[in-house]
Image (cartoon, rainbow, N blue to C red):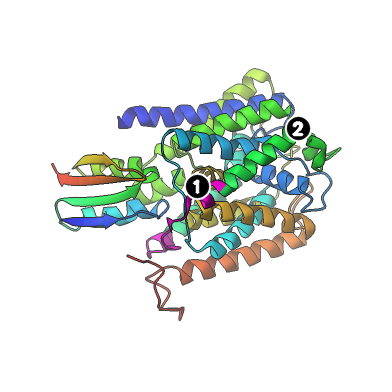
Amino acid sequence: MKTVDVRGLLCPEPVYIVREHLSSGTDPVTVLCEKHSRENLLWLGENLGWQAEVEDLLDEVRIIFRKG
Amino acid sequence: MQKKYYWLTFLGGLIIGGLALLLSKYGNPANMGVCVACFLRDFTGALGLHANAKTQYLRPEILGFVLGSFLLAKTNREFNPVGGSAPVIRLLLGIIAMWGMLVFLGCPLRAAIRLGAGDFNAIPGILGLIAGVWTGTLFIRQNFTLGRATKVPRTQGYAFPLLFLALTVLVLTFPTLFLASKEGPGASHAPVLISLIAGLAIGGLAQKFRLCMVGGIRDFILFKNYRLLLSFAGVVLSVFAGSLYLGTFKPGFTNQPLAHTETLWNFLGLYVAGWAAVLLGGCPLRQLILTGEGNTDAAITVVGLMLGAALAHNFGIAASPKGVTAAGVTGIIIALAVLLTVSIAFSEKLRTVFGFSKSSTKTA
């Protein structure tokens, strides 16, 4: 499974990077991000037609995107 | 969930606009109920770091922005100390972003407030902001990055919020410790507690909804996501409606409070600020909010903004209602040169073409 780590990056970089991965044909895509990027990444996934499974960790969030 | 979040973001903008009007009614300068750039400049002056006697006041709103964000982030377990993403470059970008804003006379948030209150000089400013953000996104598309921040010891994340807490205690107990203007914009201010509470509310709102006055334009250009634009629109709308209600709405270009009519420099001032804010990952308000969340790079950016304000007033870069100075023009030219250099040097697809070091700032 592909994991994309966008922790430590400020907007718009996380969305920009994850968008490239969601467009690359891999499925599923796991994303590790900081909490401030969560809503923007969920918006991106929904907008591109992906299902998202969100897991809140201590200081970060893991989102697993699956093509619906 | 998305729809509700969009509406709440819009509501956040409306509330901030309303609070700005309220603060002006209670004594803050007209069309400057809230302005992060102006307030940081007054803050810098209050600490004696610049010599302009008219712009010195330890604005409690600034303390409130950071502490409101800090308290909410702690409550929501979003306090996460990180750092190490090109702090020196961020310091530099903070300095020149402030120069741009002080040539326009306001941050992106004040641009929205000025527009809502009928100051048409904000229009070239906002057009400049859009153009600057667009320029910044060109480099994002070339993989611009200042590199990844990593976790730092929690003490580092606490340092700035606690410093601001200490300043809050001092301003409430020994206000005479700080310099305070007797005339000019620095002398116009709401009572300390009202300013502090409004600041805390805005800080909390901005933390919760990740509000950023530059992010709206940026996300729309890059992703066609208009959520943050709604907060900008909310500010403009509530200031517009509130000014009409209060009878303070005054449409036009001339005789606007704390503004000048030099279109080109209004445009270029916020052009610089918008471009710098894209590279920094957020507008000045957002930098204060991130500081409250424990981001030490944002804290350094805030120091840069303050240093920029000090330099702008000590060297005459800041504009005044009379217009822009020769030093201000020079400041903008320097700022543009710095922005272009940093943008190219940190864009992964461009840096080697222009002969900058090949070594990547990205760790993964």
Using a 10 Å C-alpha cutoff, classify the residue at mark 2 as few (fewer than 14 neighbours), some (14 to 19) or many (20 or more): few
Instruction: Give the side of residue B223 with respect to residue B291, left or right.
Output: left
Q: Which residue is mark 1?
A: B294
Could you tell me if the residues under marks 2 and 1 are in contact, i.e. CB atoms within 8 Å? no
Instruction: Tell me the kind of residue under disc 2.
Output: Thr
Instruction: Give the side of residue B154 with respect to residue B7, left or right.
Output: right
Instruction: Give the side of residue B350 with respect to residue A68, left or right.
Output: right
Q: Nearer the viewer, residue B87 or B251?
A: B87
In percent of width and height, residue A29 lies at: 19, 52
Query: Is residue B153 one of those drawn in magenta?
Result: yes
Q: Residue at x 73, y 53 (%)?
A: B318
Relative vertical location of residue B50 with respect to residue B108 in this rendering, above or below: below
Q: Secondary structure at mark 1?
A: loop
In percent of width and height, residue B274 lies at: 54, 52
- C-alpha gap between disc 2 and disc 1: 26 Å
Question: What is the magenta range?
Answer: B138-158
Residue mark closest to the camera, 2 vs 1: 2
Q: Secondary structure at mark 2?
A: helix
Question: What subunit carries mark 2?
Answer: B
Relative vertical location of residue B144 with respect to residue B125 in this rendering, above or below: below
First along the sequence among labels 2 and 1: 2
Asked if both marks, 2 and 1, belong to the same chain, the answer given is yes
The label number, if any, that marks residue B173 in the structure image: 2
Using a 10 Å C-alpha cutoff, classify the residue at mark 1 as few (fewer than 14 neighbours), some (14 to 19) or many (20 or more): many
Q: Residue at x 15, y 50 (%)?
A: A28
